[in-house]
């Protein structure tokens, strides 16, 4: 993820000339995606400036100990009852996506003001500033930044937020250890032979042909909301950890949320990203493998299984179930629908009727 572009102008001014190695006459210290006059400070595609060098080129903070992305080991995620549901404000606004741009490192979409998130265990309301993507090389080389149990997804969508109290000033936000919040969504190749799906992803990716070269941008016509792009994701299920920007200068200011369900996108749409936009001009290479390697593990939390289901389940089993090995009118406590399913399968015991507080078994089949 990267800070929003409106700051870049301000940050451009802070490009500091410094003697650095032999090959880099200057490094743009704070700017992840802007070319300094004498050369870009970092890259994905070349061994002299790719992520193996970021810790040297940007020792504060890329060499820090709270770096992103990470591999999420689901079995090691501990339960945290503070991880409640999010409130998404104006995610359904089909005019919220204002501009799509080629930064030379990613494809970034600027969001209109008024798009916000709160809840989700966050301490504050956060403004949604922009989203961008990370990918590999077509649908054949996956390029998500985070991995889950070692699995790398085809792509990863990052929606970048700044604490609302900073009013969009990300220079201030990156100085706060929870100043930024990033929502990460995995993108997986849709099974089957469908093309152009989901429709709004197809539409969004059709704009890539307008931003082939670095620095180009295109105004997005109304018609796509943020919600439209998050199809098929249960936003109540997520992982949480404290990490960093995944691009230099890697500031350790990000509250990360990674949603467990992936967005499913057809292969042809995924392929468009690595075969349309280029890293500089029209004769430069296509933008591929734009993701940082996994960093040292951080402690990850997730919802407790009882809060995932929304309530704790009680089962009252009627007498007729006793033949199935259940005590009559036993009240058992189960903590998730998954456990309930398993329980029902074992007992072959029936027609559950469910209320907010408990499930009552009416009979056996
Ligand atoms: Zn990102």
Image (tube, grey):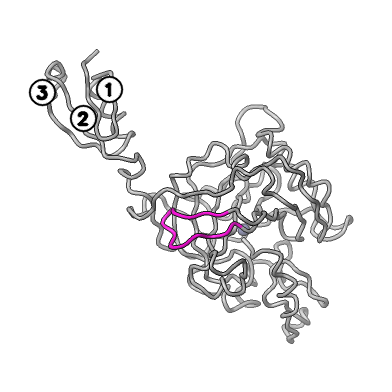
> In this rendering, would 328 be left or right of 193?
left
Query: Mark 3 near ligand 1 (CB under 8 Å)?
Result: no
Q: For ligand 1, which image quadrant applies?
A: bottom right
Give above or below for 58 relative to 180.
Answer: below
Specify the quadrant of the image occupied by residue 22: bottom right
- In the image, which disc is placed on residue 315? 2
- Secondary structure beneath dot 3 equals loop
Of callouts 2 and 3, which one flags the residue occurring earlier in the amino acid sequence?
A: 2
Of callouts 2 and 1, which one flags the residue occurring earlier in the amino acid sequence?
A: 2
Residue at 81 percent across and 61 percent down: it is 215
Q: Which residue occupies the extreme bottom position in the image?
A: 19
Q: Which portion, as a residue range, is magenta? A: 116-128
Q: In the image, residue 137 lies at what x, y percent?
A: 70, 48
- Secondary structure beneath dot 2 equals strand
- In the image, which disc is placed on residue 328? 3
> In this rendering, would 244 be left or right of 98?
left
Alpha-carbon span between mark 2 and mark 1: 9 Å
Circles 2 and 3, Cβ within 8 Å, touching? The answer is no
Q: Nearer the viewer, residue 253 or 67?
A: 253
Q: Quadrant of the N terminus?
A: bottom right
Q: Pointer 1: what residue? A: 352
**Is residue 117 within the magenta segment?**
yes
Q: Residues within 10 Å of mark 1 (few under 14, many from 20)?
A: some
Number of callouts in the render? 3
């Amino acid at each position: 993820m990267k800070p929003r572009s409106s700051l870049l102008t301000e940050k451009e001014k802070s490009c500091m000339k410094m003697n650095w190695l032999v090959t880099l006459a200057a490094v743009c210290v704070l700017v992840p995606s802007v070319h300094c006059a004498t050369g870009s400070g970092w890259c994905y595609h070349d061994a002299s400036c790719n992520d193996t060098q970021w810790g040297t080129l940007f020792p504060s903070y890329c060499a820090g100990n709270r770096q992103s992305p990470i591999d999420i080991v689901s079995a090691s995620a501990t339960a945290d009852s503070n991880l409640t549901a999010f409130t998404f404000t104006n995610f359904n606004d089909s005019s919220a996506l204002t501009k799509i741009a080629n930064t030379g490192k990613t494809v970034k979409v600027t969001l209109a003001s008024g798009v916000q998130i709160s809840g989700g265990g966050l301490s504050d309301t956060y403004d949604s500033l922009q989203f961008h993507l990370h990918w590999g090389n077509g649908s054949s080389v996956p390029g998500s930044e985070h991995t889950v149990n070692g699995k790398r997804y085809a792509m990863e969508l990052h929606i970048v937020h700044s604490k609302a109290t900073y009013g969009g000033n990300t220079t201030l936000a990156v100085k706060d250890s929870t100043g930024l919040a990033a929502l990460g969504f995995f993108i997986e190749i849709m099974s089957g032979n469908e093309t152009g799906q989901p429709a709004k992803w197809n539409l969004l990716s059709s704009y890539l042909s307008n931003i082939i070269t670095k620095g180009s941008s295109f105004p997005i016509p109304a018609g796509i909301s943020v919600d439209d792009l998050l199809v098929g994701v249960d936003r109540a299920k997520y992982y949480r950890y404290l990490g960093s920007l995944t691009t230099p200068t890697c500031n350790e200011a990000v509250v990360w949320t990674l949603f467990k369900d992936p967005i499913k996108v057809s292969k042809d749409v995924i392929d468009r990203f690595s075969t349309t936009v280029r890293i500089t001009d029209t004769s430069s290479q296509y933008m591929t493998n734009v993701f940082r390697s996994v960093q040292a593990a951080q402690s990850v939390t997730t919802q407790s299984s009882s809060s995932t289901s929304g309530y704790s389940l009680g089962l009252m089993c009627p007498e007729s179930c006793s033949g199935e090995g259940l005590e009559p009118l036993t009240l058992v406590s189960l903590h998730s629908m998954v456990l309930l399913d398993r329980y029902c399968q074992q007992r072959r015991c029936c027609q559950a009727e469910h209320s907010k507080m408990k499930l009552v078994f009416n009979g056996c089949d």
